[in-house]
Amino acid sequence: MRKPYIYGNWKMNLSAAESADLISSLLAIKIDFNKVDVGVAPDFCSLKKVAETVHAMDYPVSVAAQNISVEEKGAFTGEVSAAMVASAGADTVILGHSERRTIYGETDKVINEKVKTALRNKLDVILCVGETLEEREGGVAVERVIYQVGLCLQDIKMDRIDRVTLAYEPVWAIVTGKTATPADAEEIHGKIRDHLSKMYGPVVAKKVRILYGGSVKPDNISALMMRENIDGALVGGASLDVASFVKLINFNG
C-alpha cells in the first residue's frame, strides 16, 4: 500500500514572509502524518525560511525547490545549483514541470540531466510528465507521456528510482480550471506504472508513487484518490490557501 502524498507547488506567488506565514498556519492545523505525506515547494527566495520553519516546528514535511541547474557550479548567472538548494534546506526538487517545458524550453534530455544531478546531490525528485491538448486530441497522450518517462529516467539505476516520485500533469489542465476525469487520469497513471514495471520490474513499479497534478481542488480530490494508481496530488493554486490545502491533505479524514 503506497502512502498518499500531497505536495503544494507555490510557484512564483509569495514573499519569504508570506511563505513562512503559510507554512506556519498550515502546521498549526491538525494533520495525521501517519495517513499522508505532505510537502511544499516555495520559491528560491523563500526556501530557507520555509525549511527553517518546518524544522523548528519539527514536523515531517518535505520542502522542495522548484528547479535546479544542470551545472554544479561556475559562471552561470541566474542559475541555482542542487547543492545550493540542499544547503538552504530542500530535500526534494520538482523537475520537468510543464511550465519549465513550455515557457523555458526544457527538453526531456535536459530534464534527465537535472534528475541525475539532483540524485547525485542527495535530493529526492518529483518528475513531472504530461501531454498537451493537441497531443490528447490527436490520440497520442499515452505515447507522449511514456516517451517522457523513458527519456527523463534514462540511466537512472534501480538503486535510485526509490527516490523519484512521478507526477502526471496534463498540460491542458494547468491553471485552466480543467481537470482530467478520474478515469482519464487513472488510465495514464496505469500506463506509467506498466512502463516502470518494464524498466525496473513489477516489485519496484508498485512502490513508486505517481501523483496527479492539474487544477486539483477539494471537490475533486476524493474521486481522484479512489483510483488504484493515483497516489496523491501535486497542487498549484489550491495550496496557496490554508483552508483548501488542509482539505486536500485531509481528503481521507
Image (spheres, rainbow, N blue to C red):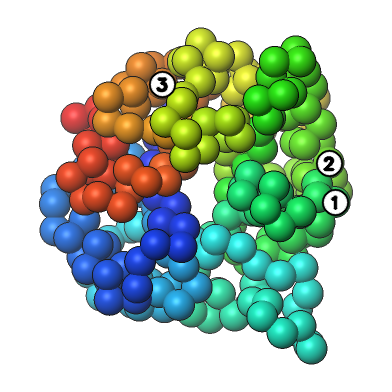
In this view, the residue in front, 185 or 14, is 14
Res. 91 in view: no
* Position of residue 30 measured from the top left corner of the image (x, y, whole percent): 14, 48
Does label 1 or label 2 sit earlier along the sequence?
1
Q: Are marks 1 and 2 in contact (CB under 8 Å)?
A: yes
Residue at horizontal 52 percent and vertical 31 percent from the top: 173
Distance between the alpha carbons at the discs numbered 2 and 3: 27 Å
Residue at horizontal 70 percent and vertical 15 percent from the top: 137
Q: Specify whether 102 is left or right of 42.
A: right
Report the quarter where the N terminus lies.
top left
Residue 151 is labelled as 2
* Position of residue 217 measured from the top left corner of the image (x, y, whole percent): 33, 32
Classify mark 1: residues with Cα within 10 Å, few (<14), some (14-19) or many (20+). Answer: some
* Position of residue 92 measured from the top left corner of the image (x, y, whole percent): 54, 60
**Tag 2: residue type?**
Leu
Question: In the rendered image of this protein, does residue 149 appear above or below residue 225?
Answer: below
Q: Specify whether 39 is left or right of 118.
A: left
Question: In the rendered image of this protein, does residue 34 appear above or below residue 198?
Answer: below
**Tag 3: residue type?**
Leu
What residue is shown with label 1? 109
